Image (spheres, rainbow, N blue to C red):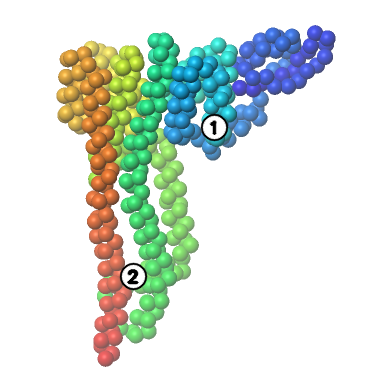
Amino acid sequence: MKFKFKAKTKAGEIREGLVNAASQDLAAATLQKNELFPIHIEEDTGNMARKVFAKYYDRVTDKELLVFFRQLAILIEARVPIVVAINAIEEQTSGSFLKIILSDVARDIEDGVTLSDAMAKHKEVFSSLAINIIKAGEASGNLKKSVEYVAGNIERNYSLTSKVKSAMVYPVIVMVVFFVIAFLVVTLIIPKLAIMIKDLNAAVPWYTTVLITSGDFMAKYWWAVLVIIFGAIGGAAYYLNSAEGKRELDRIKLKLPIVGIIFRYVYITRFSENLAVLLAGGIPIIKAIIIVSAVVDNSAYEDLLLLTAENVKRGDNMSDVLKKSPLIPPMVSRMIKIGEDSGQVDSVLGHITKFYGQEVELMAKNMSTLIEPILMILIGIAVAFLAVGVLMPIYNIAGQIQ
């Protein structure tokens, strides 16, 4: 971070400026090394404001982190010093917030802080999983391998999430387009057809009356309907961003038809892969489970893993806790039991990751095929209701006139 300073030289001259340091004490030490005697030192609030702004409007993406760790692994393999490597990556990084973070990390390392501890100061960017893997690599003297582990883990998680999101894009677009068209039809077209029906003074069925009344209301108060729709969307977004809302959304995800099973498999894959990486890196199992609970990205699985860590701490087997939960398929708990008995839990978790990762990929590819008929049926029912409610009465009246 940057600090504003006011200091005296040996000759008694007053100097003002900025100094980079991890803390105010280190900033003072840096000034003294340069034969400046501090009078006043304070954090540069302008830099802090830029950092806060960048944090919320230019968030670090998984793709940016993936590129960072890949490049860092290559530079470490080329025996480039860590500080030089991070500064080089920071110079070519396009994201403003990541540039600020990497600059802070490089400065902390220059001040004698380890890479993992420097990353730990920015937990809004670096996950506890990445920090602990890097820490294990520093302890074992194999930092390059640990950085590659992190990069590979981010890449697999990014790929897994992207496949699920891509599979959901088509049905979401279809539903949005359908509701827009339905809004325009009810607002613009139905009122004009309703005028024709009213002019004929003919009796109409109840469902036609409902459509005509809805069309008249939409024609007059369409702006109010839009306000209600956007207000509902905004309210839902606000609620889902709260702690309670996120927990509710996590529960809903697991209960959704078709996609619910995909979400379950994604969380199981994420759990098994991340735990395998941590155990292979030498992290104790209780600490590893707690770390994984924070990165699995679902509160239901997080609660289960925290409960598992508590039971393992008391001497129970991880498999005994997991098999009692409906969130974990029996096959998973049985395979983990085999791993515990053979002392190869990380290897077994790798096989679980491979199986469920392939299942997610296959189901994501087939999801559009599964959802498309359902969407077509729903849209067909809506179109049929409009046709029967508006067009059929007109045809009947025209037939009576003939």
Q: Identify the residue shown where x is 73% and y is 22%.
A: 17
Residue type for callout 2 = Leu
Residue found farthest to the front: 78
Visible residue check, residue 73: yes
Write down the quadrant of residue 401 in the picture.
bottom left
| Badge count | 2
Vertically, is 272 above or below 193?
Answer: above
Dot 2, crowdedness within 10 Å: few (<14), some or many (≥20)?
A: some
Q: Nearer the viewer, mark 1 or mark 2?
A: 1
> What is the number of the mark on residue 211?
2
Q: Identify the residue shown where x is 30% and y is 76%.
A: 391
Dot 1, crowdedness within 10 Å: few (<14), some or many (≥20)?
A: some
Q: Identify the residue shown where x is 42% and y is 51%.
A: 232
**Residue that badge 1 annotates:** 93
Residue 265, image x and y in percent?
Answer: 26, 35
Residue found farthest to the bottom: 402
Q: Secondary structure at mark 1?
A: loop
Vertically, is 23 above or below 372?
Answer: above
